[in-house]
Image (cartoon, grey):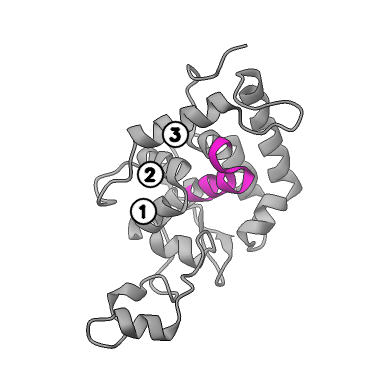
Amino acid sequence: MSDGTAVRLEPHEIALLGGGSRAAVTVAVVELYLRGQVEAGLPGTVRAGVADAGRAEQPLSPLAAAVHACLRTPATPTALVKDPGVRLAVAVMRIPLAEAGLLRRPLLGATRAARRHVRDLRREHSLPASRHGLSDSERLLLVGLHGEGALRLLVPRFALRAGLVRRAEVGRAALLKDSPSGTNGGGGAFLSCGGGGGGGGGE
């Protein structure tokens, strides 16, 4: 059996190996967001948006298509992971990864080779200093590799409003202490909803 390191992995497959189903679904949600097909709904939810025809040159990944299909009503990320159609898409994703030796049977956890491969990819594709100048495919790869750190850098407003990242649990006293002027300055960017959650170019 191959150790899987020669397999070309897609961002959602990398996320599955490195962080499980929730991480893979997060990549699918970001894929849809970058195409304008989803947006943040009520705080902590994702809802279907209006597709950007200019970004439809490539088909959606099967997992992203399954996520989009279940968004008949706004849903939280947790509800998306539990949706039967999304769970089926994740299960289908696991088959070639298991055949490539990247997932163990029967529990289908990541193999040692898979974990090593993901670590190597993280070193090769470290988080940049800025989100500017990156293609959508590069953004998806970084989200697949670095999870919440990439979300906060690349799509911060959408990720916060859609519930893809946790709100910072910082007390008011800590904010006042850390703020140079004694008020809530720039360090509070992730403490409240703000800005539009529309198309991918708005971050």
Q: Residue at x 28, y 75 (%)?
A: 186
State the residue lying farthest toward the top.
1
User: Which residue was labeled with disc 3?
Assistant: 119
Residue 20 shown in magenta: yes
Q: Earlier in the sequence, mark 1 or mark 3?
A: 3
* Residue 151, position as x, y percentages in the image: 42, 54
Instruction: Please state which of the two labelled residues, at mark 1 or mark 3, is closer to the viewer.
Output: 3
* Circle 3: residue type: Arg
Which image quarter holds the C terminus?
bottom left
As rendered, which of 31 and 199 lies closer to the eye? 31
Q: Amino acid at mark 1?
A: Leu
> Which type of secondary structure does the marked residue at label 1 adopt?
helix
Question: Bounds of the magenta span?
Answer: 17-30
How far is disc 1 from disc 3 in space, using C-alphas?
20 Å
Task: Choose mark 2 or mark 3, whichever is in front.
Answer: 3
| Residue nearer the viewer, 187 or 161 | 187
Q: Are marks 2 and 1 in contact (CB under 8 Å)?
A: yes
At label 2, the amino acid type is Arg
Q: Mark number for residue 154?
A: 1
Say which label, 2 or 1, has the lower sequence index: 2
Q: Quadrant of the N terminus?
A: top right
Task: Bin the neighbour count of mark 1 within 10 Å (Cα to Cα): few under 14, some 14-19, many 20 and up.
Answer: many
Nearest to the observer: residue 34 or residue 187: 187
Q: Which mark is residue 139?
A: 2
Please tell me which residue is depicted at 69% across the width and 58% down the height of the picture. Answer: 79
What element does badge 2 sit on?
helix
Query: For residue 49: magenta?
Result: no
